[in-house]
Amino acid sequence: MQRSGKPSASVRAFFSRCVIFFAQCLLPALMVWSGSPLARAQQPPLLIAHVMPTTGRFALHAEADRRGVEMAIEDFGGKILGRDLVLLTRNATTDPAKAAEIAESLITQNRIAFMVGAIDSGVAAAMSAVCQRYGVIFINTNSSAPSEAVENAHRTKFVFDANGANFNKALLKYALDRHPRKRAILLTEDNVWGHSNAAASRGYIERYGGSVVEEIVVPVSLPDPAGLAARIASMDIDVVAVNLSGNNQIRLFSQIDPALFERQSWVVGEVDWEELYPAPGTPRPLFGTTWAWNLDTPGTAEFVARYRQRYGNTVLDYPGDVTHAAYLAMRALLQAIEAAGTTQNHAVIRTLETMRWSGHERMQHDDAWMDPVSHHLQQSVYTATWRHDPVNPAAGIEILGHLSPEEVRYEREDHTRLESFDETPLYTP
């Protein structure tokens, strides 16, 4: 019997099924395994959740933070490991319970890759606890309660702002040394940030030979700033350790006669640019910061010029410490992903834990490093004052000096306990 040389219908059907199986199942797996450019091109974008109190008293801080994150993403061309970076913005409010709900939804419903932001330390603590439960890396760009790097620290959280303990360690000694009696009061905002900073301030006041004669705890709403200012002005004390945040600083200091500062030393652990520049007439005699637009450090002038080219026609037409911190925090995350060669959380965390940056990279005077014990960035801090210049309001900030990371490190971070990697779920966006 002569054969035609053509496969039978059943054989052709078998080969057809094999081709379909290879195309639908084996080929995508091989492409992912091989890390081919085509495979990377077919991967979905990485969603970066930027979660901030975008309304209320921290709205301007949230906008400044977002700008820093945007500039960092631009540095990487909007991609990492060949995948597009998409910024997803959510309003965390200042309610920790609401912030936790938003974090849960972003992880379970939106399938975010990473979370950045916070500003409010109570919000940061709530969101980061949710992130730890799922293994999602949380980059705390700009909240500064010491508790963020101690009792509220997590393996998946990295804190990039200096905290009140770092600032007050230097500032309170300077202020107390001016007064032989060293009588101090604590002015404390009734929230996580306020109480955490007040606790650190109390410890340093006592270490430097001072005494805390009273602690005034004020509601977050600050109902009577004029009455509070008058009450403190009438007190027989030498140093006022101020732990008020956001526009509460503006509201209080607008009620104070600057002549009072000749008799009492008012120390504000940290003042953000967003609390100075929009209210140029309110004085700040002594405070701490991590960066200023007029710092004489490598890279600062270039960064300011780049910012002003993009945002120069807005309310914040000069960048401040919030934008600077968010920019470098986002860059650090992207650098770690690039170095690890993967988005798998354990690999990225291990990379971040060992990272160091030169002073030149950070536009500061000293090298900075991520503390592997507390996941808190150890960096330069600056003492500053604010004197209104009506001719050039942006020039009102004056840097008085700087301190190294070693000089301002918060000792309690030696005892921070992070979850183990076994306790931290694997998460690969």
Image: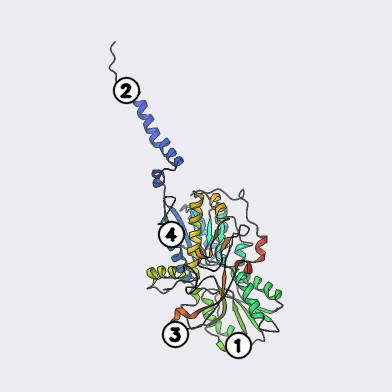
- Foreground disc of the pair 3, 2: 3
Q: CA distance from mark 4 to mark 1?
A: 46 Å
In the displayed structure, does residue 79 sit left or right of residue 254? left
Which numbered marker is on residue 73?
A: 4
Q: Residues within 10 Å of mark 1 (few under 14, many from 20)?
A: few
Specify which label sits upstream in the sequence, 4 or 1.
4
User: Looking at the image, is mark 1 or mark 2 nearer the viewer?
Assistant: 1
Number of the front mark, 2 or 4: 4
Q: CA distance from mark 3 to mark 4?
A: 35 Å
Residue 105 percent across, percent down from the top left: 49, 56
Q: N-terminal of the two: label 3 or label 2? A: 2
In percent of the image, x 60 and y 87: which residue is there? 262
| Residue under the point 40% across and 33% down | 21
Label 2 vs 4, first from the N-terminus = 2
Q: Which residue is mark 1?
A: 262
Q: Is residue 165 above or below residue 240?
A: above
Residue contact at pointers 3 and 4, CB within 8 angstroms:
no
Marks 1 and 3, how far apart in space? 22 Å
How much space separates mark 3 and mark 2, taking CA atoms? 89 Å
Is residue 279 visible in the rendered image? The answer is no
126 or 327: nearer the viewer:
327
Amino acid type, residue under disc 4 in the picture: Ile
Pick whichever of labels 1 and 2 is earlier in the sequence: 2
The residue that mark 3 highlights is 390
Percent across and percent down for residue 14 are: 37, 26
Question: Residue 375, percent across and down?
Answer: 59, 59
Q: Are marks 1 and 3 in contact (CB under 8 Å)?
A: no
Please state which amino acid type lies under the numbered disc 1: Glu
Q: Which residue is mark 2?
A: 9
The N terminus lies in quadrant: top left
Residue type marked 3: Pro
The numbered mark, 3 or 4, whose residue comes first in the sequence reads 4
